[in-house]
Amino acid sequence: MKNFDVLIIGTGQAGPSLAVRLAQNGMTVAIIERHKFGGSCVNTGCIPTKTLVASAEVAHQAQRASDFGIEISGSIKTDMKKVKARKDAIVNKATHGVEEWLKNTPNVTVYEGHARFIDNKTITVNDQKISAEKIFINVGARAFVPPMEGLEQIDFLTNSSILDLDYVPEHLIVVGGSYIGLEFAQVFRRFGAKVTVIEKAPRLIAREDPDVCDTVLEIMQHSGIDVRLNTNCLSFSSSENGITAHLGCESNKNTITGSHVLMAIGRKPNTEDLGLENTDIQIDQRGIIVVNDELATTVPNIWALGECNGRGAFTHTAYNDYQIVADNLLNEAKRKVTDRIMAYALYIDPPLGRCGLTEAEIRARGYKALVAKRPMTQVKRAVIKGEPTGFIKVLIDADTQKILGAAILGVNADEIIHSILDVMYAEKPYTLIRDAVHIHPTVSELIPTTLENIKPLESRS
């Protein structure tokens, strides 16, 4: 049996950086990868999907070039084979980069195979036993596909398998009106597919504030996407014309027939085949590894990082998990996951940037709050770029004057949101950014202007 100071399972966003940093501090590190180096972000998440988003944006701009006085002769078509080849080249370079980085780092030993716990200290991989004083689980998550009538009769796609398409589907039915589903819906609509989004809830991305949900719905519909909300009793069947989705219960039934179905309902952690039953590591009913504020599991000297710990479903939160455990181990920093302000983006066009609390969360916590809001129609840079959809909204604690949360839906929102996020991390009052002088003409310059007009947040019964 081989013994190491540190054992890391998985090479997602947290694992490689942690392996290299601990190795550079003199520890012997084993890191195990069963499939592709880089985890979901590099292979099936952020990198490939945003590469497709970039191609879709170019297609969209070409299609509306005449709005800007630019005439393009000939038809505009998507060559999906070339789109996929570009995406694959970017992904392969990133994956290979992670692999080479790890394999060429002194004190790091890379194992390629499936890891499984024998006990709290020992793991098998490729019939070898490995033990370590400290173990970090960084196994990520994958698409969750719930039981659904007729699903076994059709070949459906997930966020991973849809990336293998080298042609544009005739009609893509997307099940799930949240972040993953909406991004793919708009991408393939811009590539030329007919797209229908089916969502069980009464709103898209239902965790967001109603004004965000309503505007996102308008964006989807303006993109030419058919959105069906409040869809209960969903089932599927094969038909001569493709795949038929059956919507509605006894009193309100209808059908939609498409060529492809994308299941984009949620994610599940990759924990069921790790041999956790042979350990004292606690998991919840969804298979998420239970961790404390410092990401430690219920077994001493075992930590869980990234999506499998349920404390953040994003690449940036996984990387922050690495930062927390590394600083705590090496510098006795006492960093905690609860110090993190939740922030994320929805990469539709125009995008949504979010940080902090929603209106509903603010009301639930009993804050006396203020709100500042400005439509993108009053942001000249958005008008100039022909993208006046959306708004800037900032929520403020009336007592402390600190920012509680923000939503920016509009051009470059995924970048602009960070100016608000940084003020929140600095724990400064909103007046700091209100009184700042930003560059004209930008979208960011309207954040101070927006904050000049605040009013009480209305209560909701």
Image (tube, rainbow, N blue to C red):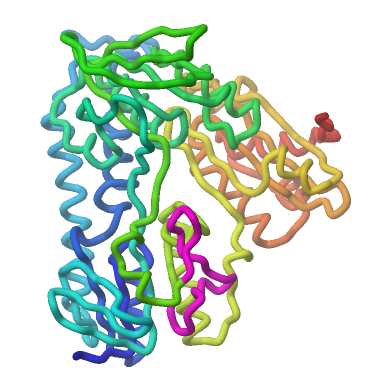
Quadrant of res 393: top right
Viewer-closest of 397 and 210: 210
Considering only vertical position in the picture, is 104 above or below 220?
A: below
Viewer-closest of 211 and 450: 211
Residue 142 position within the rendered picture, expressed as x and y whole percent measured from the top left: 33, 49
Farthest front residue in view: 250
Q: Residue at x 41, y 16 (%)?
A: 223
Q: Is residue 75 visible?
A: no
Residue 287 is one of the magenta-drawn residues? yes
Q: Residue at x 73, y 49 (%)?
A: 403
Magenta-highlighted residues: 282-302
Q: Is residue 427 visible?
A: yes
Residue 446 position within the rendered picture, expressed as x and y whole percent measured from the top left: 65, 35
Residue 22 position within the rendered picture, expressed as x and y whole percent measured from the top left: 36, 83
Q: Residue at x 19, y 91 (%)?
A: 1
Drawn side of residue 370 relative to residue 105, left or right: right
Residue 424 position within the rendered picture, expressed as x and y whole percent measured from the top left: 67, 55
Drawn side of residue 33 relative to residue 447, left or right: left
Q: Residue at x 16, y 68 (%)?
A: 113
Q: Quadrant of the C terminus?
A: top right
Query: For the stretch drawn in magenta, what is the main secondary structure?
Result: loop
Viewer-closest of 272 and 11: 272
Residue 15 is one of the magenta-drawn residues? no
Give the number of marks.
0
Drawn side of residue 402 relative to residue 195, left or right: right
Quadrant of res 426: bottom right
